[in-house]
Image (tube, rainbow, N blue to C red):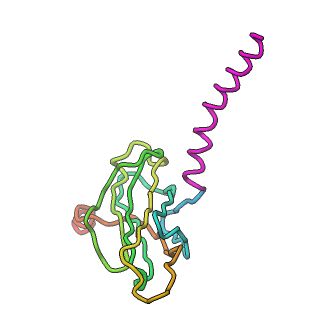
Amino acid sequence: MIDRECYLIFCLIVFMIFVPCYSHERLFDGKTLYAGKELWKETLPFQSGSRVYRLEGLKSNSWYEVKISYPASIPALFSLQLSRDGEVGLKLNQMRRLLNTEKLIFKSESFENKEGLYVLVTVEPEGIVAIPNFKERSFIIYNIGKFFSLLTLSSIFFFITT
């Protein structure tokens, strides 16, 4: 009887250790953004859709921009959040509104572990379909990427003076 209880406790401990790791990996669903590359025709559910992308190829002490573009004919509200090692909450670049684009600008030196940087993309519908008997879209298509190192005024000044 005691052996069975110990076995059940052992299985419970193993389950508690490995299940959070599995769910953490599923959250990021294997999408990676590489510096200078763009992912085309990505899709998200239109109602409360979200996806996390791992950022790769970052150089330390550099400014980067992650940009999303989507069809202007589909009124949507995209949001981009920078996170470190799966911990969401590093909100940057708030209150930016342009037609059918959204971008996030950040500096890589402000993070100790540049390999553990992620971008959380979320989308919400921002309007309703005004056509009678027309079904709402269930997915939205977008392009994301082409994040690159940006020149700063100090680097331009250094380039001119040398």
Find residue 78 and report its image quarter. Answer: bottom left
Residue 94: percent from left, percent from top: 27, 61
Tell me: residue 85, above or below residue 55: above
Residue 151: percent from left, percent from top: 31, 66
The magenta segment is 1-29
The residue closer to the viewer here, 1 or 45, is 1
Question: For the view shown, which residue lies furthest in the front direction?
Answer: 133
**Quadrant of image for the C terminus:** bottom left
The residue closer to the viewer here, 100 or 19, is 19
At horizontal 27% and vertical 66% (from top left) the residue drawn is 159
Tell me: residue 48, above or below residue 68: above
Question: For the view shown, which residue lies furthest in the top direction?
Answer: 2
Q: Does the magenta stretch include residue 27?
A: yes
**Quadrant of image for the N terminus:** top right
Residue 126: percent from left, percent from top: 36, 74
**Number of numbered discs overlaid on the protein picture:** 0
What main secondary structure does the magenta stretch of the protein show?
A: helix
Tell me: residue 30, above or below residue 77: above
At horizontal 60% and vertical 56% (from top left) the residue drawn is 30
At horizontal 44% and vertical 78% (from top left) the residue drawn is 70
